[in-house]
């Protein structure tokens, strides 16, 4: 398994390659479009965050639309690790954000997502100097997560890794996330589920091409098309 330092380096290089500065936030949907990653958003079981599939030069991602927008953004970067950084990758079902060292490659993908979505330099840039000497405020936490469009849990894990918050603060800041965002005047869309039914890229064309080139079976093709509301079995019987 790669070290955290090696993973952080990979995240920094990925951001640079994709044209992001060290403090820039990432528009994940634009990132997917720019890199020709076919992506489908569907409501799924809460324990399942997404999946990635790579076949030849074609890349697919499935994202759980039952999760908050912030968590979806983290999952997208997690899946990008599988598609663009991991060697010899074909497909994987994921539960992004567990940060479980026992999960090997999933652990690597989580830390990659954390550093790609919430770069350390970008985080430090948004923290007032006075708070670096004392305690980070809730107002600053909200500012950071809104800027990087990330989930609170992922941000707190990154801040803890950077030794910017204590274990006590970690648990304190996990409470009443959406409520406090409202109190500070922020749009709460980041904390809600969303994007159900959204498709990024020429999904149907690529799925059909995969099937015709025998990268996936007929049942897999039918399953992929059902994800965007098309029942090919029913269509064929008409």
Image (cartoon, rainbow, N blue to C red):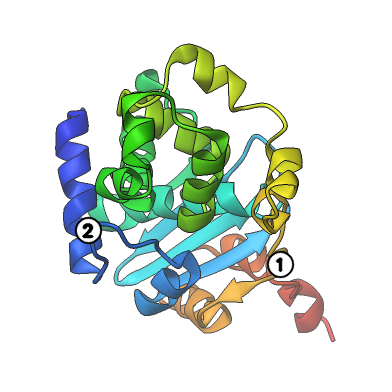
| Quarter of the figure with residue 189 | bottom right
Count of numbered badges drawn on the protein: 2
Instruction: From the image, tell me which residue sits under label 1.
Output: 226
Which residue is depicted at the point 43% across and 70% down?
32
Question: What is the C-alpha distance between the residues marked 1 and 2?
Answer: 32 Å
Looking at the picture, tell me which residue is in the foreground, 13 or 61.
Answer: 13
| Looking at the image, residue 68 lies above or below residue 172 | below
What secondary structure is marked by label 2?
helix
**Residue shown at the point (48%, 57%) measured from the top left:** 147
Q: Residue at x 35, y 27 (%)?
A: 164
Name the one closer to the observer, 7 or 24: 24
Q: Are marks 1 and 2 in contact (CB under 8 Å)?
A: no
Residue 185 image offset from top left, x and y in percent:
70, 54
Q: Nearer the viewer, residue 10 or 170?
A: 170
Image quadrant holding the N terminus, namely: top left
From the top left corner, tell me how far across and down residue 48 is, in percent: 61, 40
Q: Earlier in the sequence, mark 1 or mark 2?
A: 2
Please say whether residue 2 is visible from this viewpoint: no
Picture coordinates of residue 134 (x, y %)?
38, 23
The furthest residue to the front: 130
* Residue at the top extreme of this rendering: 168
- Image quarter where the C terminus lies is bottom right
Query: Which residue bears the numbered disc 2?
Result: 14
Q: Nearer the viewer, residue 8 or 172?
A: 172
Q: Which mark is residue 91?
A: none
Answer few, some or many: residues within 10 Å of disc 1's Cα (few below 14, many 20 plus, some between 14 and 19). Answer: few
1 vs 2, front mark: 2
Describe the element under mark 1 as helix, strand or loop.
Answer: helix
Say whether residue 167 is left or right of residue 54.
right
């Amino acid at each position: 398994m790669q070290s955290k330092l090696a993973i952080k380096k990979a995240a920094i290089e990925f951001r640079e390659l994709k044209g992001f500065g060290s403090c820039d936030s990432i528009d994940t949907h634009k990132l997917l479009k720019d890199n020709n990653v076919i992506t489908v958003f569907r409501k799924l079981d809460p324990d399942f965050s997404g999946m990635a599939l790579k076949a030849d030069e074609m890349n697919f991602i499935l994202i759980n639309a039952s999760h908050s927008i912030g968590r979806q953004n983290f999952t997208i970067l997690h899946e990008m690790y599988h598609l663009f950084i991991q060697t010899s990758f074909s497909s994987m079902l994921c539960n992004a954000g567990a940060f479980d060292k026992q999960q090997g490659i999933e652990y690597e993908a989580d830390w990659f997502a954390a550093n790609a979505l919430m770069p350390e330099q970008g985080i430090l840039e948004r923290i007032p100097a006075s708070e670096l000497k004392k305690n980070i405020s809730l107002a600053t936490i909200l500012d950071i997560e809104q800027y990087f469009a990330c989930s609170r849990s992922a941000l707190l894990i990154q801040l803890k890794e950077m030794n910017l918050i204590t274990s006590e603060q970690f648990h304190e800041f996990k409470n009443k996330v959406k409520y406090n965002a409202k109190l500070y005047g922020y749009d709460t869309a980041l904390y809600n589920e969303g994007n159900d039914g959204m498709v990024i890229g020429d999904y149907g064309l690529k799925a059909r091409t995969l099937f015709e080139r025998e990268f996936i079976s007929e049942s897999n093709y039918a399953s992929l098309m059902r994800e965007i509301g098309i029942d090919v079995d029913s269509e064929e019987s008409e």
